[in-house]
Image (cartoon, rainbow, N blue to C red):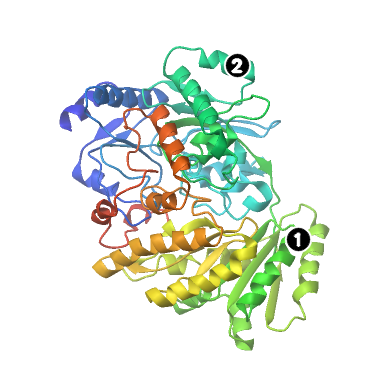
Amino acid sequence: MSKIAAYLRGHISGEVSTRDDVREALANDMGALSIKPELVVYPRTTNDIRKVARFAWQLAEKNHVLPLTVRGAGTDSTGAAIGKGAAIVTPAHLNKVFEYDAKQKLVRLQPGVTVGALQSALALNGTSILSLFGAQSYGTVGGAVASAVGGPLAGKYGTIAQAIDQLEVVLANGDVLQTKRINKRELNKRKGEQGFVGDIYRGVDGIIEEYADVLGKIELNDITGYGSIADVKRKDGSFDLTPLFVGSQGTLGVISEMILKADFRSTRTGICALVFANNNAARDALDALANLKPAILEYFDATLFDTAARAGRTYKFYATASEQFSPESVIIVGFDEFNNRQRAKSLKRVEKLFDKQEGVALSTDDSEGESELLEALEVTHYTFAPDQGGVGGNEIFSGFYIPTARLEDFTSALRALSEHEHIALPLAGHAITNTYAIYPSFALHKVGDKQKLLKLIDSLAKLIYDHGGIVIAEGGEGRLKARAAYDGIDSRVVEMFEAVRKVFDPYGTLNPGVKQPNDVRSIATQLQDGSDRAGIARFGV
C-alpha cells in the first residue's frame, strides 16, 4: 500500500496515512466488528474524492480492487463505516457550512459537519434540522444521511430523507452527480447522455420498469437494501435519485455536499413522564397519547431506569413512582408548540387522561432550562455503555418497526426469547413511528457471547417478520444485519437490490460487504474481542 499512498499523495491536496496506529484507530465503529483499513485518506475537496474514486476504478478495471469506505465520526453500529482498502474520512477537512438561505431555510454544507455544529449554527436563526434531534452531537451529517436517521421527532417532522433538498455525489468512477427532481423531458435528456451518469439514469429507470411488480409492495418506512427506489419515479414521470442515496451507507457513491431544509423549532418543550406499574397498560396508553399529536412519544421498559439507578444515575420522577409501586414501563411524551398556552393545554390533556389512574405516576415540566424529563430520553446509555470494560450493548439491535396492533404480541414473544437465551432484552423506541430497539449487553471477549450476539440477530429478525414488522426501518443493515434482513424478504426484491448496486458500482469498489448478505463465518472472524468505545471517547460515550 505504500506505493498507492505515495501516488495518492502526489495527486490530492489532502493527507494519506498508512501508519499502523492511525489505521488501528479507524478499525472499529460503535458496533461489534473490527476491520482495519490498509490506508486512510483525509480529502480536502470534492476533487480529492473524485481522484481517489477514479484511481480505484482504474485499478478495478485491471482486476485489482481497492475498496473505498467512507467514514464520518464512526457512530454507525452495523459495520458500514469500517472496511479494508482505503478509509475516506470526512470530518478532518470536509466540515464546512457554506451558506444559509434564511428565506427558504436552506443550508448548504459538507458531509463532515457534525450534527452539533450544524444545529448550533442554525439555532442562531431559530431553525433546526428536526430529524437530527436525539442524534449524537459529534456524529456527522453525512453519516446521518447515509444511515437514514429518523429520531424521536420523526413522527411529527419526518426523517432525514424529508430534510434533503439536493445532494452532490461522487460516483464510483469519479464523476459527480447532482441530484434533484427532474421532469419527464429532462429525464429523457439524461438517459440520452453518454458516460456513466447517463448509464445510471438508464439503468435505474430500467430497473423500475423491470421490477414494477415488487415496487408497490415495499413499505414506505422500509429502508432495507435499496427499497427507496420506489420513491425515485413518480406517476407524473418526474425522477429523483436522491432517495437511493439516503440509507445507502456509502455503497452507491460518496456524498460530497448537500443542501438541507431546516424548520423553525420552539426552544421549549412541554414534557411529561408517565411511569406505569403494568406493561399492558403502558402499551394501551400509547394509542391515546398518539391521538394528542405530540412531537415526542418514547416508550421504555422500566429495567432501563433500574440499570441507570444501579449505576448511580437516579431520576426523581422514577424514584418517586418506585416508592408507590414496582414500575414496568415508562413513557415520555412532549409537545413543542411555540405557543405557551397550547403546550400547557396539551399537558393538561395528558394529566386528565392519567392523573387519577391507578398504577400510573405522572410528572410534567415546561421550564426554560434543563429538564430531568428530557434528560431521561438518554437513559439507555447506562445499559448500552456500562462502566465495566469490555462489556456493552450494540445498537445493531435498533431501528426495527413493529405495527402498533402487534406490539403486545411482539413483546410477549420477546420476553420468551429473553428467557430462552438467558439474556436481558429491554425494549425502547419511538412510539409514533413504531420504531424500536432492544438493548442486550455482551462481553465479546467471551466466545459464548459472540455466538449469542450472532444468533440473536437472526432470532430477532425472525421475530420481527413473524409479527408483521420491518427489520430495517432506520439506521441501515450494514454488514451485520444484511443476511438476516434479506432472508425474510422476497428473493425478487433482493435481486432488484443487486441490480441497483451493479448499476452504481459495477466493479465492486464502494464499501463491498455492506448491504450485501455476508457469510456468518466471515462475520464471526471480524467480531471485536470487547466493546470498544476508545475511538469516540474524546467526544462522548
Q: Measured from the top left, where is residue 90 in percent x and y?
A: 39, 37
Q: Secondary structure at mark 2?
A: helix
Side (left or right) of 309 relative to 357? left
Examine the image and state in which quarter residue 411 appears. bottom right
Q: Is residue 271 visible?
A: yes
Q: Amino acid at mark 2?
A: Glu
Q: Amino acid at mark 1?
A: Asn
Please name the residue that numbered disc 2 is placed on.
186
Q: Are marks 1 and 2 in contact (CB under 8 Å)?
A: no
How packed is label 2: few (under 14 Cα within 10 Å), some, or many (20 or more)? few
Q: Measured from the top left, where is residue 45 in percent x and y?
A: 40, 26
Residue found at x 47% / y 17%: 198
1 or 2: mark nearer the eye: 2
> Measured along the vertical axis of the image, is residue 337 above or below residue 301?
above
Instruction: Report the quarter where the N terminus lies.
Output: top left
In-front residue for pair 34/423? 423
Residue found at x 45% / y 59%: 461
Examine the image and state in which quarter residue 194 appears. top left
Instruction: Report the quarter where the C terminus lies.
Output: bottom left
Examine the image and state in which quarter residue 512 appears. top left
**Could you say which disc has been placed on residue 498 in the image?**
none
In 3D space, how far apart are the residues under numbered discs 1 and 2 (Cα atoms)? 43 Å
Residue found at x 51% / y 71%: 413
In-front residue for pair 527/47? 527
Q: Is residue 371 visible?
A: no
Please name the residue that numbered disc 1 is placed on.
291
How packed is label 1: few (under 14 Cα within 10 Å), some, or many (20 or more)? few
What is the residue that sits farthest to the bottom in this orientation?
324
> Measured along the vertical axis of the image, is residue 518 above or below residue 240?
below
Residue found at x 40% / y 49%: 482
Q: Measured from the top left, where is residue 101 in percent x and y?
A: 65, 30
